[in-house]
Image: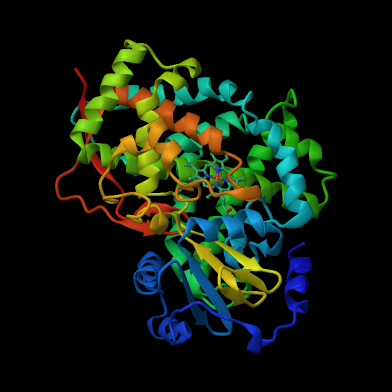
Amino acid sequence: MASAVQNQLRDRGSNPGEYRFPPGFERNLIWFAWRRFRPANPITLFQHLVDKYGDIAHYKIGWNHIVFLNHPDYLREVLVVQNDNFVKERTVRRSRMLLGEGMITAEGAPHRSQRQVAQPAFHRQRIPEYAATMIREAAGMRDSWRDCQERDIARDMMHLTLNVVSGTLFRADLRNEVHELADAINRIMGLYNFLVMLPAAEWLVHLRPPGLAAFVRARKRIDAVVHRMIDAHRNRHCDGSSLLDMMLAASPDRSADSEKLLRDQVITIFLAGYETVANALSWTWYLLSQNSECERRLHAEIDRELQGRLPTCEDIPRLRYVEMVMAESMRLYPPAWAMGRQALKDFQLGDFFLPAKTTVLMSQFVTQRDPRFFPDPLRFDPERFSPEAKARRAKFTYFPFGAGFRQCIGESFAWMEGVLLLATLGQKWKLKLVPGHRVEPEPLITLRPKFGMRVQLEARG
Ligand code: HEM
């Protein structure tokens, strides 16, 4: 299907005279990219475009036109109104090296059918079934922690959410493999910026130059775990209700192509389902450690609503402040920090007329810190997500889960997991950032804390 989309893109003619481009860089960024090899932090670039050119800005890399959008009206136009004219194509090319043709990277009919197969596992009515596993995993971690211990909470959250996603959606116990899996994924993330800037990395990977050999090795380790999980599932008697059962049932045969597609589907849900939530939680612990009044209110709500017992699914609607804290954390540190689309045909955006193949970029990180939509944007203030404040705010100013028909399929899952994990861990522990620890967001596939997140545990009385 990817090639069908590529053909569609190739077929569109263009007439340069007709176009009206937004303001932006005169200089072609390819020179900058070649000179520096690695791009500057893309968030810095986006912010610069917004500060200098406003809500829509244009630049070129090589022959490619790129526009960056920072206004809810433009976002709505691309993600909803004109969504038929936009595909992910070029913007996910590098992610395909890891994810293959899973739900995030697929287009058209293959995307629709994968989404249809997976949908029942994410239905609102199914989500409560997963709560017990989430709480059990969080309670296990909570009880293994010791007072005054120093931990890298980013690493802990990765392991916790990996166990949750495997135990719920795949009904698999990966406890013994979780370190191997997380290490291999970290290896790939470490190479991500290098890969993004490498021309034709998809082809070079077959020649295995030094950096890419490490990528191939890490991908093999991930694949091995995924294949073991699939085989174990096949050999068990399953009731057909887990996401993996559904994927296996929809897989037509055991040909190499079908097995590869199955692997792509599994790995996509795996990565999308754990990295994002783990990062959201790491940033939330960090923000709580820096805002003692919010932390106090969070603890007070947990104590009041749970009275010392473990949470259940039924408690979630009452843990409203916990949810507001998570929402505000994802405003400041959105795990998915940017999204991209590519136009199939020439298109109009406001006063501008742009050619087919233009890449359109949007950034949760930048728009959600815009003072027009979130006054005093750098202040951590969960009250921005009270029901009244939410009702007052324009749509598409807050979009951590995307929007339109490619909106995150795991959104309800993620909210529930976040709230239950924060409540279970926060019931017993206060997390204090280790003095002097450097905290810096690193925009890779997700927004990770570049140096991890070292905290000291303090038992709550
Ligand atoms: C805090 C947690 C999460 C965040 C911030 C997040 C964010 C996003 C965003 C922004 C997109 C849309 C990307 C685009 O349109 O280009 C997306 C898509 C997706 N997410 Fe999530 N996600 C989260 C959790 C999850 C979980 C828990 C799962 C599964 C268990 C999941 C699975 C997916 C999948 C499969 C897609 C592709 C949907 C499609 O294209 O139809 N995500 N996510």
**Image x and y of residue 217, in percent:** 54, 60
Q: How many marks?
A: 0
Q: Can residue 180 be seen?
A: no
Report the residue at 38% width, 37% height from top.
389
**From the image, which quarter does the C terminus lie in?**
top left
**Side of 281 relative to 297 (left or right):** right
**From the image, which quarter does the N terminus lie in?**
bottom right
Q: Can residue 343 be seen?
A: yes
**Side of 387 relative to 78 (left or right):** left
Q: Residue furthest left?
A: 435
- Of 248 and 410, nearer the camera is 410
- Of 47 and 182, nearer the camera is 47
**Image x and y of residue 67, in percent:** 52, 72
Report the residue at 27% width, 41% height from top.
287
**Side of 447 relative to 355 (left or right):** left
Colouring used for the render: rainbow
In the image, residue 457 above or below residue 439: above
Where residue 228 sits, quadrant-wise, is top right
- Of 164 and 85, nearer the camera is 85
**Image x and y of residue 190, in percent:** 42, 60
- Of 314 and 73, nearer the camera is 73
Report the residue at 39% width, 25% height from top.
320
**Side of 233 relative to 271 (left or right):** right
Report the residue at 39% width, 68% height from top.
50
In the image, residue 43 above or below residue 145: below
In the image, residue 412 above or below residue 16: above
**Image x and y of residue 150, in percent:** 22, 37
